[in-house]
Image (spheres, grey):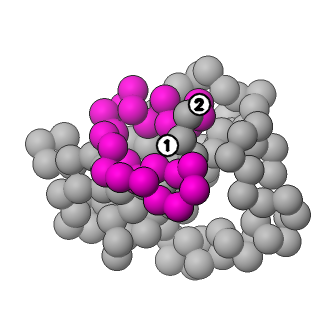
Amino acid sequence: MAARENRQFERAESFAEAIQPFLQARLCRVLTLGGVPAGFVAVDARRGSVEMLYVEPEFEGRTIGRALMRRAIDDLIRAGHRTASLVTARDTRAERFYRAQGWVDAGEVGRGSVRLEKALSGL
């Protein structure tokens, strides 16, 4: 709910509905610092995709996003995927973050969004 850009959820109820399937399937990881949630990542193990990755604003800049992405990638590798994908808004901090982690352009998706992919073999 506290995302600064690329906000998908305006209400806690819509967020809870969106994240519920990932929680039930144990495909969501939450990283806490001092017992406080600092960020989370959710994957779709069937499709080989990272569906959501958010870091609480007060925890930004502490490599939490990278740690969460590493866990997501590990989960997708364990699920048998050799390539992962995600969709993000173009020209955002999120896109720059993903590209810095080795994600590459795989085409436009809708208005202003881009699909990115990352090879997972050999990681």
Residue 35 location, x and y as percent? 73, 41
- 20, 9: nearer the viewer: 9
Near-viewer residue (53 or 10): 10
| Furthest residue toward top | 61
Q: How far from the left and from the top, in percent, is residue 63?
A: 53, 26
| Among the 4 quarters of the image, the one containing residue 64 | top right
Q: What stretch is highlighted in magenta?
A: 92-116
Q: Residue placed at 22% from the left, 63% from the top?
A: 81
Look at the numbered disc 2 and give the secondary structure of its residue. Answer: helix
Query: Which mark is drawn over residue 123?
Result: none
Q: Residue 68 carries which label?
A: 1
Residue 93 among magenta residues: yes
Q: Which amino acid does label 2 sit on?
A: Arg
Task: State the image coordinates of residue 111 (x, y, percent, origin top left).
Answer: 57, 56
Q: Can residue 41 be seen in this view?
A: no
Neighbor class of circle 2 (other Cα within 10 Å; few <14, some 14-19, many 20+) is some
Residue beneath disc 2: 93
Q: Which residue is drawn at 46% across and 50% down?
A: 114
Tell me the distance, in whole angstroms, between the alpha carbons under discs 1 and 2.
16 Å
- In the rendered image, the quadrant that contains the C terminus is top left
In the image shown, does 25 or 86 lie closer to the viewer?
86
- Return the x and y of residue 3 as percentages of the image width and height: 75, 43
